[in-house]
Image (spheres, helix red, strand yellow):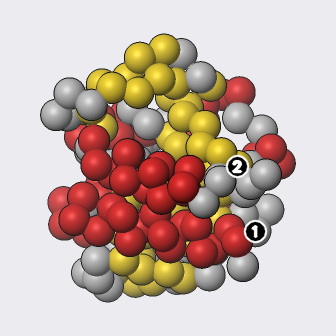
Amino acid sequence: MKKVVFITAPNTFRDEEYYKPKEVLENANIEVVTASTKIGELTGKFGFKTVSTLLIGDIIPNNFNAIVYIGGAGSSIFFDNEKALNLAREFFKLNKVVASICIAGVILANSGILKDKKATVFVDGKDTLINKGATYTAASLEIDGNIITANGPDIAEDFGKAVLKAITL
């Protein structure tokens, strides 16, 4: 069975950016594991609740087919988090799918993996992507090799479908 790990902030992650891609993947029999900076209940911006069963420091990239960084204001805790940045680098180096939605694209930019790659992000993160060497496209969804980026909640379901397609090719 294929497995995907979602990196999710403990609070104020964007609800639909979490549950829509998760639903798409689980409906295709992909196991989704939620990881955060704590084990236990996580709460989205609009009150959606989920449970983290894995600490980000305990993620073993070889156990997963993809890593997905969930957006929302809470994701800013990962912008300079070395564990989160190193995970993006490790998954990328292993040729696994690395995906982010909304402002979480800043995490990928800060990890260095977006250099010379086409990418999108919530508009607030545009300058960071450009400053870190990405080709910012302003598209709703962007796929460049094994990197998938999306700009916000309106594209969450299609983002999930893109991750699914990338790991089942």
User: Which numbered dot is residue 169?
Assistant: none
Q: Secondary structure at mark 2?
A: strand
Labels 1 and 2: the sequence-earlier one: 2
Measured from the top left, where is residue 5 in percent x and y? Answer: 61, 44
The residue positioned 25% from the left and 62% from the top of the image is 152
- Where, by quadrant of the figure, is residue 8 drawn? top left
Q: Residues within 10 Å of mark 2 (few under 14, many from 20)?
A: some
The residue positioned 24% from the left and 58% from the top of the image is 153
Q: Is residue 169 above or below residue 1?
A: below
User: Which numbered dot is residue 95?
Assistant: 1
Which amino acid is tagged 2? Lys
Query: From the image, which quarter does the C terminus lie in?
Result: bottom right
Q: Nearer the viewer, residue 26 or 38?
A: 26
Q: Are marks 1 and 2 in contact (CB under 8 Å)?
A: no
Is residue 132 visible in the rendered image? The answer is no
The residue positioned 22% from the left and 65% from the top of the image is 154
- Where, by quadrant of the figure, is residue 106 drawn? bottom left
User: Which numbered dot is residue 3?
Assistant: 2
Measured from the top left, where is residue 50 in percent x and y? Answer: 41, 27
Which amino acid is tagged 1? Asn
The residue positioned 54% from the left and 82% from the top of the image is 144
